[in-house]
Amino acid sequence: MDNKETAKELISLCKIDIDAVHAYNQALRHLDIAGVKKEVESFRGDHERHIKELSDAIRTFGEEPPEFSKDFKGYLLDAFTRVRSLTGAEGALKALKGGEEMTNRNYSNAVKMDFPLPLKSLIEKNYRDEQRHLNYIEQAIRDQVWKKAA
């Protein structure tokens, strides 16, 4: 993969993490279960860290990272999260699950690409974060944490 292609793929991942932060912000407005909210806030922090690290990597290839704004997919994800979250914690978690499934797919594809070693390690680390996010959210949904908190 040449530098231009590498930067393009990193920009794509960065945009996905930016969209995730916006979706997490939306979902957090509707999560009132303290333990779950704390976890979700830490996941948002992971996405923010991914954005910073990916942005730094993008600059090393002479490109500018994307702005911290939603793209078209981000607006759709944000709207979906907003609507789902209106039903409270259950809807917020289910909306986040959909977003994390998409993020996991993108990172899963990225770890299979031919990135230089330091970048490959970063992408693998970010992917492990994404898997952890999705596993937690799926478990919270299975456990119906919103019923236990009531």
Image (tube, grey):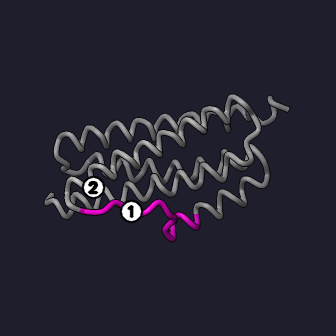
State left or right for residue 2 relative to residue 32.
left
The reply to whether residue 134 is visible in this rendering is no
Residue 10 location in percent, x, y? Answer: 30, 55
**In the rendered image, the vertical position of residue 69 relative to residue 34, given as above or below:** below
Extreme-left residue of the structure: 2
**Magenta-colored span:** 63-76
Nearer-the-camera pick, 86 or 46? 46
Q: Quadrant of the N terminus?
A: bottom left
The reply to whether residue 47 is visible in this rendering is yes
Which amino acid, mark 1?
Pro
| Residue under numbered circle 2 | 58
Residue 70 belongs to the span the image colors magenta: yes
Q: Secondary structure at mark 2?
A: helix
Residue 39 belongs to the span the image colors magenta: no
- Looking at the image, which residue is at 67% across and 38% down? 141
| Residue under numbered circle 1 | 66
Residue 23 location in percent, x, y? Answer: 59, 54
- Looking at the image, which residue is at 72% across and 31% down? 34
Extreme-bottom residue of the structure: 72
Q: Quadrant of the C terminus?
A: top right
Q: Residues within 10 Å of mark 1 (few under 14, many from 20)?
A: some
- Looking at the image, which residue is at 64% across and 32% down? 38
- Looking at the image, which residue is at 36% across and 47% down? 108
State the CA–CA distance, disc 1 to disc 2: 9 Å
Which amino acid, mark 2?
Ile
Q: Earlier in the sequence, mark 1 or mark 2?
A: 2
**In the rendered image, the vertical position of residue 135 relative to residue 111, given as above or below:** above
State left or right for residue 119 relative to residue 75.
left
